Image: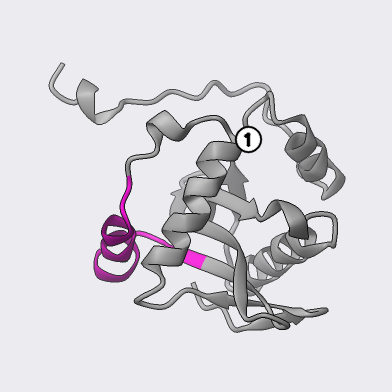
């Protein structure tokens, strides 16, 4: 996906570049703590560098605070397609804004910018999942205009299941 830098108030949203694996990993570790899923967080900075920049399985969008030049948020996305619509789609794998920066419209700006880029480039939809117990995020997504897909059930094979 083409994604040009986007400024929002004192923040800039940019596509991650090779060498950003360490900060992406740090933010995802914080997300795993926030979601109470630390025991499931296995990736390394090297895994993220490989997945994003060698295998090109997706992209990461980073949010920078212009005042400190610190990275304060991340969104990992991958791509899929809909055979029904005949258009490509985006899947948001992870979306995290550091606690002290929430409530400033950054998450809304990032979602809006992603929607704009998706529309401009002919994508048909953006999907993601959210833990049911994460009520504040569920309410945030609803307030952004997203809708729950209550008629679908999510299934998964983990790598432990591949040989069964």
At x 56%, y 58%, the residue is: 75
- Residue 59, x across and y down, in percent: 45, 65
Question: Which quadrant does the C terminus fall into?
Answer: top left
Identify which residue, 141 or 70, lies in the foreground: 70
Regarding residue 118, the answer to whether it shows in the image is yes
From this view, report whether residue 5 is shown above or below residue 41: below
Q: Mark 1 points at which residue?
A: 130
- Residue 40, x across and y down, in percent: 39, 32
Q: Give the range drawn in magenta.
A: 43-60
Identify which residue, 58 or 50, lies in the foreground: 50
Q: In this view, does 128 lie to the left or right of 76?
A: right
At x 67%, y 80%, the residue is: 68
Q: Is residue 15 left or right of residue 52?
A: right
Question: Is residue 56 within the magenta segment?
Answer: yes
Identify which residue, 95 or 43, lies in the foreground: 43
In which image quadrant can residue 33 be found?
top right
Identify which residue, 119 or 32, lies in the foreground: 32
Question: Is residue 89 within the magenta segment?
Answer: no
In which image quadrant can residue 138 be found?
top right
Count neighbours of disc 1 (C-alpha within 10 A) and say few if under 14, some if 14 to 19, many if 20 or more.
some
- Residue 13, x across and y down, in percent: 64, 75
Element carrying mark 1: loop
Q: How many labels does the image show?
A: 1
């Amino acid at each position: 996906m083409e994604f040009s830098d986007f400024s929002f108030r004192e923040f800039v949203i940019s596509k991650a570049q090779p060498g950003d694996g360490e900060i992406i990993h740090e933010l995802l570790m914080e997300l795993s703590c926030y979601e109470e899923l630390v025991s499931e967080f296995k990736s390394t900075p090297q895994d993220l560098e490989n997945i994003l920049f060698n295998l090109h399985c997706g992209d990461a969008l980073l949010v920078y605070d212009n005042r400190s030049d610190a990275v304060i948020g991340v969104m990992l996305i991958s791509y899929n397609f809909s055979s029904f619509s005949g258009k490509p789609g985006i899947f948001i794998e992870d979306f995290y804004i550091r606690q002290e920066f929430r409530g400033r419209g950054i998450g809304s700006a990032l979602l809006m910018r992603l929607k704009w880029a998706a529309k401009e480039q002919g994508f048909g939809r953006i999907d993601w999942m959210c833990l049911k117990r994460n009520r504040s995020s569920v309410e945030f997504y609803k307030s952004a205009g997203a809708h729950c897909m209550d008629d679908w059930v999510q299934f998964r094979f983990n790598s432990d299941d591949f040989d069964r």
